[in-house]
Image (cartoon, rainbow, N blue to C red):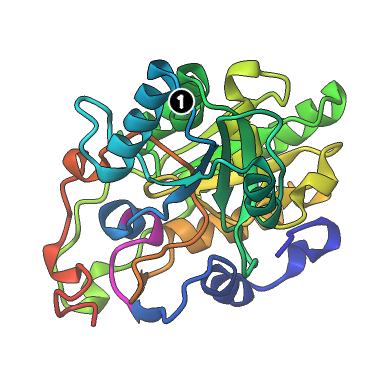
Amino acid sequence: MRWKGSRAAMAATVLALAVAAACGWAGAQIATCPIPLYRYALEWWEREPYEVYVFCDGALTDYERAVIERLEAMAAGDGGGERAVNLRMRRVESESRERLDSHAAVRGEVPESLPWMVVHYRPVGANARTPVWSGALTDENVDALVDSPKRQEIADLLLNGAAVVWVFLESGNEAADDEAFQILERELTRLEAALEPPDAGAFGVEEIPLPDLRFEALRLSREASEESMLVNMLSRTEPDLERYANEPIVFPIFGRGFVMNALVGGGVNPGMIRETAEVLAARSTCTMTQTGNPGAGLLTAMNWADHIEPLAEEWAPGGGAAD
């Protein structure tokens, strides 16, 4: 779903429904509770894994085997010092290059050389996974895939009190980008003071010690080489975002790196920023999934659960109060 131009007048109730539908929350249950959505997602939602396909013909060097073993260790969660990474690794091996090319074509790309990596993720609103990135099997590419300075900054902000990190993907038009970013910053500053969290008393519980509401806005250049993976991931969280490469796009990121519907071009306006912020920060909606799949998100190298202290255990999925 695209929030653009005159659609800024769309009601918040429609947006709330769109969150569940567009983020792929199959079998989701919606229940009211005194914890804002951004905080509930941080405490309880698990990340959806990216799928990394490695195509090879069996003629691997020691170095290439070591890179594959590293990916396998990360996928298994026992990377020996690797931070927790939400990926699955699938190895496609055959002595026949024709057979490998046929397998790869089904997944959207024919390898330029072997061994070759193709990374897939299911974007919002799509029924199938789509290629996010592809390239040679090297340690450098694995490093760039699983982490980057901006992703670490986003994670640090979310773990240290930011309710939502609004990533502003620049269009390259300096004047248009500056104008849209100023609109974003002004509205976020206003909303930090204006929005109120859900009333815990209405749920018969004591006040929940939420931190003061804080939003952060970060600019991201499409030309930043160290963030090319992040740009690819964000651009593919919805099926058609690449069509808007000449417009600024805002990605509200919350919880454990989950990505809300993008605000595109003229959709970067006070009305749509407010509607999005209200759903994430001021609505008393706890969303649980039967599948554990919260929808679109980023590939991050972070063991989130180790850094989070739940505010109210009784509202955990299956804890009783939220059921």
> Whole-percent x and y of residue 47?
38, 53
Above-or-below relation of 174 to 100: above
Residue indicated by mark 1: 60
> Whole-percent x and y of residue 221?
69, 23
Image quadrant assignment for residue 21: bottom right
Determine the residue positioned at 36% across, 59% down: 197
Residue 37 sits inside the magenta stretch: yes
Start and end of the magenta stretch? 32-39
> Whole-percent x and y of residue 190?
56, 43
Q: Is residue 12 left or right of residue 211?
A: right
Is there any visible trace of residue 302 in the rendered image?
yes
Above-or-below relation of 291 to 144: below
Is there any visible trace of residue 186 in the rendered image?
no
Q: Is residue 58 left or right of residue 101?
A: left
Determine the residue positioned at 35% across, 23% down: 66
Image quadrant assignment for residue 284: bottom left
Give the quarter of the figure containing the C terminus: bottom left
> Whole-percent x and y of residue 285?
38, 72
Please tell me which residue lies in front, 268 or 123. Answer: 123
Q: Is residue 195 left or right of residue 179?
A: left
Determine the residue positioned at 19% across, 27% down: 80
The amino acid pointed to by label 1 is: Leu
Residue 115 sits inside the magenta stretch: no
Please tell me which residue lies in front, 286 or 305. Answer: 305
